[in-house]
Structures are given as structure tokens and as C-alpha cells.
Amino acid sequence: MLKINHIGYAVKKLDRAVSQMEDIGYKFGNMVADQDRRIWIVFGRKDGYQIELISPISKGSPIDKILKNSGPTPYHICYESDCFDADIEQLTCGGGIKS
């Protein structure tokens, strides 16, 4: 059975986004730089929910296009799976996700 692990948010300024989310009760871990993808990442938790804030380190990051098209926004849901193949089968063939 799929379980949501986190919701990912593209943000322009990571420090500002962390501060705003802390104001509503989120607690964050350490920021991590992914130099290969040119992004900053940090995870926050509140009331059993987890979010991931992602911002560009420099131009050319994969987050640039999302921010350009939509501005700061949630853009992905990460699921946990105990049986990946069965869950993919159910999502694609069982009436879930249609591509």
C-alpha cells in the first residue's frame, strides 16, 4: 500500500521559505546542497507530515523551469512502497494514474 512520504515544493529563496514554514510550526533539518543538480534541499516536519523545500543554487537547475512557469509551488508527491512493482501495476492498470 502506498504511503505519502513528503510533498516537494519549489521555492525561490530557501531561507525565506524555511522561515515562513517555521512560523506555522514546521521543524527543519539541515540544508543539503546537491551540486550535480544545482539545488538546495531541506526537509521539514509538522504533525506527522513531511515537506521538502527545493531551491536553485545557480541558473540551470531543474527547478528554474518550475519557478518560471508557476512560481513557488508544490510540484511533486513522493510515495513509499512496500511492493513497488505491485503498486506501479495498480496505479497504471488498476484505474489510478493515466499517462
Image (cartoon, helix red, strand yellow):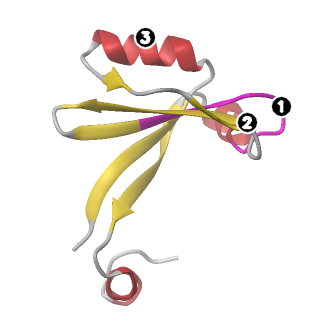
For the point 26% across and 15% down, which residue is it? Answer: 24
The x and y percentages for residue 96 are 33, 77
Tell me, for residue 64, which label it has, or none. 2
Marks 1/3: CA distance?
Answer: 23 Å
Tell me, for residue 59, which label it has, or none. 1
Asked if the residues shown at circle 1 and circle 3 are in contact, with their CB atoms under 8 angstroms apart, the answer is: no
At label 3, the amino acid type is: Ser
Characterize the local packing of mark 3: few (<14), some (14-19) or many (20 or more) Cα atoms within 10 angstroms: some
Residue 80 among those drawn in magenta: no
Marks 3/2: CA distance?
Answer: 21 Å
At label 1, the amino acid type is: Lys
Q: Which residue is mark 3?
A: 19
Q: Nearer the viewer, residue 2 or 72?
A: 2
Asked if the residues shown at circle 2 and circle 1 are in contact, with their CB atoms under 8 angstroms apart, the answer is: yes
| Disc with the residue nearer the chain's start (3 vs 2) | 3
For the point 73% across and 36% down, which residue is it? Answer: 64
Left or right, 74 with respect to 63, comes to left
The x and y percentages for residue 76 are 47, 50
* Location of residue 21 (image quadrant): top left
Q: Nearer the viewer, residue 5 or 72?
A: 5
Left or right, 95 with respect to 9, comes to left
Question: Is label 2 in a helix, a strand or a loop?
Answer: helix
Left or right, 75 with respect to 50, comes to right
Question: Is label 1 in a helix, a strand or a loop?
Answer: loop
| Disc with the residue nearer the chain's start (2 vs 1) | 1
The x and y percentages for residue 23 are 31, 9
| Disc with the residue nearer the chain's start (1 vs 3) | 3
Q: Nearer the viewer, mark 2 or mark 1?
A: 1
The residue segment tinted magenta is 52-62
